[in-house]
Amino acid sequence: MSVSTRRRAAVAGAALAAVVLAACGGDPTASDGDTITVGSAGFNENEIIAEIYAQALEAEGYTVQRQMQIGAREAYIPALENGEIDLIPEYSGNLLLFFDGESTATTADEVDEALDDALPEGLEVLEESPAENKDSYNVTRELSESEDITAIRDLAKLGTVRVGGNPEFETRSYGVPGLQDVYGVEDVEFVSISDSGGPATVNALLDGDVDVANIYSTTPSIVANDLVTLEDPENLIAAQNVVPLINEEKATDELEDILDRISAELTTEDLLALNERVDGDEKAAPATAAQEWLEEKGLI
């Protein structure tokens, strides 16, 4: 019997059980094999991706329970390990560092290989997507075009480079030290702006108080202000591809195929657009943005 045939049989059995339970005053539930609890971290982008996973699974007949906005890894990784949740969207580089804080992997392939070794027994990552959300160096369109700056190394053309970012960016390996050691941008003036690439950082860039700013790569203000995200050919900033993290007890071939199709379609540009819909003026619900993305891509 194929996986899909077994699943249809299980659903039929669950439906019959629901009738019996209803007659007895009980709560109907789907069979364990077809019930998936999808969680998200405590920010909107992650909830959008979790909704994409959840709705795609529901479209294939799975019963999905949701636990959104759980919080940080310290909260949801134990929940994944003990079966309170089964599936959550993750970011490859930061997930690796959670389990192996000494890792020096930066490219997508290096991170993938190291992550396979670092994950504890019982957890599994599926196919990653091209979509990333990570630290990025951004300049205005005007500066990019006037000085021909498209990659991080091009910042050396400016002489003294004023860099805006959170205080820790001054000492982190992918911050000022990386500019100097990896790309040879030696003359750096650091401007501390404590809002994680938010409005104060963007305004400093637009007002000319800094030349380049550290902003997370899927922040809607990048698109809204026509900023240019600089290329990073030396992989100074570690890969942060969106990847499904699952309790391997739930990782059937059929479920993996559904999630692999999503990963094949999801891009960084998609995340930017989805975040703009949810966090911008529209204030769309994450579930609405997720549904319309799935329909646009022909996945439901």
Image (tube, grey):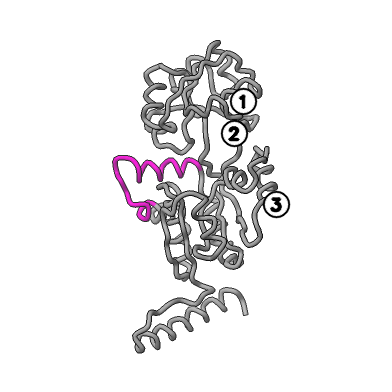
Where residue 243 sits: x, y (%)?
56, 51
Give the spatial CA distance, label 3 vs label 2. 21 Å
Three-letter amino acid code at disc 2?
Answer: Ile
Disc 2 and disc 1: Cα gap in Å? 9 Å
* Residue name at image x 63 percent, y 33 percent: 235
Q: Percent position (x, y) of residue 282?
A: 29, 44
Residue 42: x and y in percent read 43, 49
The residue lying toward the viewer, choosing from 122 and 8, is: 122
Local packing at callout 3 (Cα closer than 10 Å; few below 14, some 14-19, many 20+) is: few
| Residue 178 numbered tag | 1
Q: Which of 152 and 180 is in front in this view?
A: 180
Residue drawn 57% across and 67% down?
A: 250
Label 3 close to label 1 by CB (< 8 Å): no
Q: Which of the numbered marks, if any, corresponds to residue 25?
A: none
The C terminus lies in quadrant: bottom left
Whichever of callouts 2 and 1 sits on the residue coming sooner in the sequence is 1
Q: Return the residue at label 3.
A: 117
Which range of residues does the magenta coloring cover?
268-289
Q: Distance between the residues labelled 3 and 1?
A: 26 Å
Q: Is residue 244 visible?
A: yes
Q: Mark 2 points at which residue?
A: 237
Q: Quick check: can you spot residue 296? A: no
Question: Under tag 1, what secondary structure?
Answer: helix
Residue 252 image point, x, y percent: 60, 67
Pointers 2 and 1 in contact (CB under 8 A)? yes
